């Protein structure tokens, strides 16, 4: 059942989430609606669109229940380029620099590994949105030790440079280069995709849980993997 949203939480959501919502919106969309007891970012006809910038694990229960009756598109931004903006406690900008890190589509699996069983659901699809972002760090002493206790106060969308939609298992498997011969190891998968082995392991884990890959033995201590025949 759908009810008008109360917009609870919109004042505290990060700028990136709100700006992606505006970027995605089309005429006729209903924004911030309650469906089956859950707040939904965008309702487009019979399709529910949810924007999640991080922490897919927090959506397990919500998605599991919504997918029983609704088609759900989960939208996740991947920062191709990111600028770090440092502010003092009062919000005055101190510096701005470009991060050396660059996101790529495989980063989607860093989040999908928390919900691979749901990613294979016929009512589920996922959209990676490639962005340029600003990340605002504030010198408040409450942040992670990795940032020397600077907090991430906000994330801002600067530009969207494209998107990629995954509707089914075949769409995910297209990320595996055609020239990679089966069966293959995680190292061979990493080399073919141009990513670290730890990341190819995450890709493999998700695809195996989704039923797109299977383990067919070992080569020494390394698992041998191949695409499931029905896919």
Image: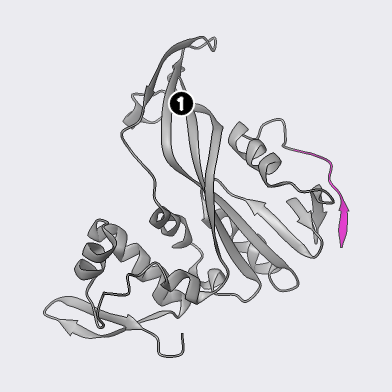
The residue at 46%/85% (across/down) is 231
Q: Is residue 145 left or right of residue 19?
A: left
Residue 80, x across and y down, in percent: 42, 42
Q: Which residue is mark 1?
A: 151
Q: Residue furthest bottom?
A: 229
Residue 181 versus residue 174 in the image, above or below: below
The quarter of the rendered structure image containing the N terminus is bottom right
Q: Quadrant of residue 188?
A: bottom left
The residue at 67%/37% (across/down) is 18
Nearer-the-camera pick, 126 or 57: 126
Residue 205 versus residue 141 in the image, above or below: below
Nearer-the-camera pick, 70 or 195: 195
Q: Is residue 38 visible?
A: no
Residue 70, x across and y down, in percent: 74, 69
The residue at 76%/48% (across/down) is 26
Q: Is residue 196 left or right of residue 138?
A: left
Residue 212 versus residue 229 in the image, above or below: above
* Residues rendered magenta in the picture: 1-8
Q: Is residue 153 visible?
A: yes
């Amino acid at each position: 059942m759908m009810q008008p949203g109360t917009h609870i939480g919109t004042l505290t959501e990060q700028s990136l989430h709100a700006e992606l919502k505006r970027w995605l919106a089309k005429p006729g969309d209903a924004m911030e609606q309650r469906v089956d007891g859950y707040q939904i970012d965008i309702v487009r006809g019979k399709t529910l669109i949810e924007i999640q910038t991080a922490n897919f694990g927090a959506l397990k229960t919500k998605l599991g229940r919504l997918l029983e009756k609704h088609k759900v598109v989960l939208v996740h931004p991947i920062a191709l380029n990111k600028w770090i903006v440092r502010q003092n406690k009062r919000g005055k900008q101190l510096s701005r620099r470009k991060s050396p890190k660059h996101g790529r589509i495989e980063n989607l699996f860093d989040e999908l590994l928390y919900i691979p069983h749901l990613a294979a659901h016929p009512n589920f699809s996922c959209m990676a949105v490639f962005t340029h972002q600003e990340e605002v760090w504030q010198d408040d002493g409450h942040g992670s030790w990795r940032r020397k206790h600077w907090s991430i106060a906000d994330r801002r969308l600067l530009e969207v440079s494209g998107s990629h939609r995954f509707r089914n298992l075949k769409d995910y498997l297209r990320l595996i280069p055609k020239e990679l011969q089966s069966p293959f190891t995680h190292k061979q998968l990493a080399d073919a995709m141009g990513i670290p082995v730890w990341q190819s392991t995450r890709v493999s884990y998700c695809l195996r849980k989704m039923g797109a890959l299977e383990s067919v033995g070992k080569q020494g201590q390394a698992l041998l993997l191949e695409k499931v025949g029905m896919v």
